[in-house]
Amino acid sequence: MTSAETSTFQHEAVSRDDLPQFVLPLVVRIERGSPPTRTDALQTAARAVLILLADERATGGGPWAGAVRDWQDARIRKVVRRARGAEWRRAEALPGITVTQPAGGGAADGAPEAPGAPEGSGVQEAGAAEVRVFPPVPLDGWPKDLARLQVSGTDLADPGPPPPPPAGVPVLWLAPGLDMTAGKAMAQAGHGAQLAWWELADADRAAWRAAGFPLAVRTPAPERWAELVASGLPVVRDAGYTEIAAGSCTVVADHPALRTG
């Protein structure tokens, strides 16, 4: 992600590319016969990123805070892998946070999740989207049980067009016409959520967190997309490491508190 070049997390005198590189691992649960819909998976991944950023373990003197700071100072990379069965159980045994959205394809509007909330029981509701997010790791230092998971195979689908997002809910708008796997799109949605989080005032962050980070991921019509990119809202521009060309605009983060007009 290259949209946050002016972020306060960036070292003023050091290029992001010259710093040690970290990656935020996300694992999506895809069981045979009960995969989540694409929209549910994207929304759950975006919420997972926000929940980790707001977690007390990732801030201040928390045990994940140093890794999160190092990750945010360098390139903001996220990689989504898939797991099922024993693979998922091994992933859940590692330090992280599991975020679940019931099947439905609407806006993700789960109840607030307290830091250190109990993880899932291992039994998945049919069609539910489950994503586990982990504290950042060095680019070449993935834990063994995550490194063995596949990046490919995250081709998820929606049964039909998702409904319009509810009024007042933050929306992560995906670029129409870009051919991205679900895993790539999940990472991009996570980038968009993170840019919105960075730009919000403290009071707006607190309100979003207290509400459980409701959000929707949708794809606008091409003419609407052009308006969104030019609107002044945060825009994710891909670094070009995988699937799409460098500099491609992939997501506009449309949080009501960031609108100026």
Image (spheres, rainbow, N blue to C red):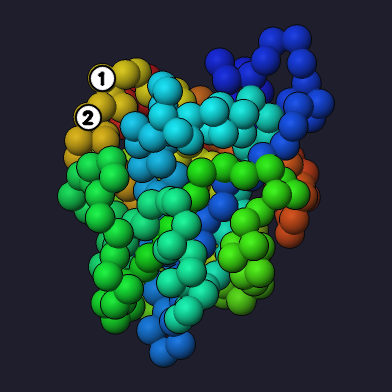
Above or below 18: residue 241 = below
Where residue 174 sits: x, y (%)?
A: 52, 51
Answer with left or right where residue 52 lies relative to residue 151.
left
Confirm whether residue 124 shows in the render.
yes
Above or below 8: residue 173 = below
Where residue 154 sits: x, y (%)?
A: 57, 72
Crowding at label 2, few (<14), some or many (≥20) Cα neighbours within 10 Å? Answer: few
Q: In the rendered image, which quarter is residue 253 located in?
A: top left
Answer with left or right where residue 101 lies relative to residue 238.
left
Where residue 222 sits: x, y (%)?
A: 55, 52
Where residue 198 sits: x, y (%)?
A: 46, 26
Q: In the rendered image, which quarter is residue 243 located in?
A: bottom right
**Label 2 with label 1: CB-CB less than 8 Å:** yes
Look at label 1 and name its amino acid. Answer: Ala
Under tag 2, what secondary structure?
Answer: helix
Which residue is at a point 22% across and 29% down the rendered structure image?
A: 207
Which residue is at a point 76% across and 16% down the rendered structure image?
A: 14
Residue labelled with disc 2? 207
Q: Please tell me which residue lies in front, 64 or 194.
A: 64
Q: Residue furthest bottom?
A: 33
Which residue is at a point 20% across and 35% down the rendered structure image?
A: 210
Confirm whether residue 180 shows in the render.
no
Above or below 207: residue 190 = below
Q: Residue furthest top?
A: 13
Under tag 1, what secondary structure?
Answer: helix
Number of callouts in the render? 2
Q: Please tell me which residue lies in front, 82 or 154.
A: 82
Residue labelled with disc 1? 203
The image quadrant where one finds the C terminus is top left
Look at label 2 and name its amino acid. Answer: Ala
Answer with left or right where residue 144 lies relative to residue 134.
right
Which residue is at a point 45% across and 33% down the rendered structure image?
A: 63
